[in-house]
Image: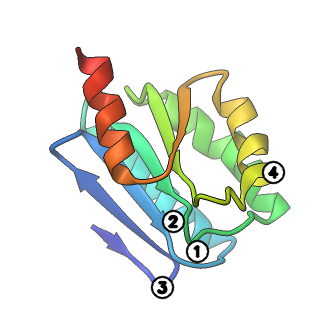
Amino acid sequence: MFESEFCSVKYLEDINVVLVTWKKYCSGEDYRKPLLFAIKIMSGHPGCDFVADTTDGFEDAPEDTQWLLNTFIPLARQTDCQRIFFIIDRDNTLKNELDAQTGELKNYFTVQTCFDLSEVRQSLKDTAK
């Protein structure tokens, strides 16, 4: 769907989520384009949730974190997205970064961390019961 050297964005129809997989550090438009593409997918699929795979991720630049708060969150709120998942590495090397982001995200979405996509799938299955 969207592919760059920094990120891939895919729609997973079987669980109705957009999966954003970060590959390496980026900032500015390289950071924002994939997230805007993810919003477009979420807007086109009712009830679509958001998954960010940060296992090979990085810490955001301060201006990108601000963009996330000022632009991404309001746009995501205009979709049917209810849940945001972060796939983290076992050592949770991005704990401070994710804590900063999830604090604001939790005001609008259910936010959950997982270690892999199978945990996301299980969580979605459990909440569908």
| Mark identifier at residue 33 | 2
Q: Amino acid at mark 2?
A: Lys
Circle 1 residues within 10 Å: few <14, some 14–19, many ≥20: some
Real-space Cα separation, disc 4 to disc 3, in angstroms: 25 Å
Separation of residues labelled 1 and 4 (CA atoms): 22 Å
Q: Residues within 10 Å of mark 3 (few under 14, many from 20)?
A: few
Q: Secondary structure at mark 4?
A: helix
- Tell whether 22 sits left or right of 81: right
Q: Which residue is mark 3?
A: 5
Q: Amino acid at mark 1?
A: Asp
Residue 17, placed above or below residue 6: above
Read off the residue under disc 4. 96
Residue 122 versus residue 101: which sits nearer the camera? Answer: 122
Q: Which residue is mark 1?
A: 30
How far separated are the C-alphas under marks 1 and 2? 6 Å
Q: Is residue 47 left or right of residue 109?
A: left
Q: Earlier in the sequence, mark 4 or mark 3?
A: 3
Question: Does residue 126 appear in this view?
Answer: yes
Task: Count residues near mark 4 (Cα–Cα under 10 Å), then give few for <14, some for 14-19, many for 20+.
Answer: few
Give the x, y percent position of residue 34.
Answer: 47, 64
Residue nearer the viewer, 113 or 49? 113
Q: Assess whether mark 4 and mark 1 are in contact (beta carbons under 8 angstroms).
A: no
Residue at disc 2, secondary structure: helix
Q: Residue furthest bottom?
A: 5
Q: Residue at x 23, y 51 (%)?
A: 12
